[in-house]
Image: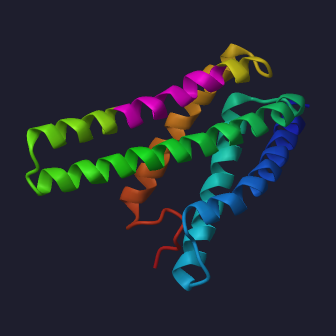
Amino acid sequence: MKRIYRIISIAVAVLALSAVSASAQNNFGFGGNQQGRNASAWMDKMKSDKIAFLSSEMGLTPNEAEKFWPIYNQAEKEKESTMGEVMKAYMELEKAVDAKKSDKELTSLMEKYLKAQKTSNEVDSKYVEKYKKVIPSEKIAKLFVAEEKFRRNQIMRLHRGNGNPYQPQR
């Protein structure tokens, strides 16, 4: 019975992912060229794997999954947005360092970068309260552990291959 719940949870999660997938393609600028299609396929595969992994690690029931995934997807969109701001601030700071800008300019850009990082880090805190309304704290804790495990697995896959962990090895 537990296995059936897990399979249903994964199916619900994959359906939730499909709604986010189209949005993510636009956010990352994937276009109609071959490289864009490969990147899009990679993102879809990675997100699908992530949802399956998180669902399994958290042990969500179908009822929990139905309520949890829309909130999680909303949090992920917000994280993508805040990470975009972090990267923008970082790139501005990096250019200023390379251009040997004044202390005043560097201080201002560092503050902008740190503020963007803080905003990005606050997303998880904000959503914990929303998660608590639909799943127990134990499963929220498992979410954070599972996300880190998944991230580390992706990094290891990248190191084993040369680039895209979903690219067929030749």
Which colour scheme appears in the figure? rainbow
User: Viewed as shown, does residue 132 lie left or right of 103?
Assistant: right
Q: Tell how many labels.
A: 0
Q: Position of residue 164 (x, y in %)?
A: 47, 66
Which residue extends farthest top? Answer: 137
Work out whether residue 146 or residue 125 is closer to the camera in this orientation and state it: 125
For this view, does 65 lie left or right of residue 82?
right
129 or 95, which lies in front?
95
Q: Is residue 46 positioned above or below 117 on the image? A: below
The answer to whether residue 162 is left or right of residue 49 is left
Magenta residues span 115-128
Residue 109 as seen in the image, left or right of residue 11 = left
The one of 57 and 24 positioned closer to us in this rendering: 24
The residue at 18%/52% (across/down) is 96
Residue furthest toward the bottom? 33
- Main secondary structure found in the magenta portion: helix
Q: Nearer the viewer, residue 147 or 7?
A: 147
Displayed quadrant of residue 30: bottom right
Residue pictured at 80% horizontal, 22% vertical = 134
Point 62% across, 65% down: residue: 26
Q: Residue 90: x, y in percent?
A: 30, 48
Instruction: Please name the residue shown 69% across and 40% down the image.
Output: 74
Q: Is residue 31 above or below residue 52?
A: below
**Residue 144 picture location, percent across and down:** 56, 28
Is-magenta flag for residue 110? no
Query: Residue 120 lies in magenta, yes or no?
Result: yes
Q: The N terminus is located in which quarter? A: top right
Q: Position of residue 91 (x, y in %)?
A: 29, 54
Q: Please say if 135 is above or below 113.
A: above
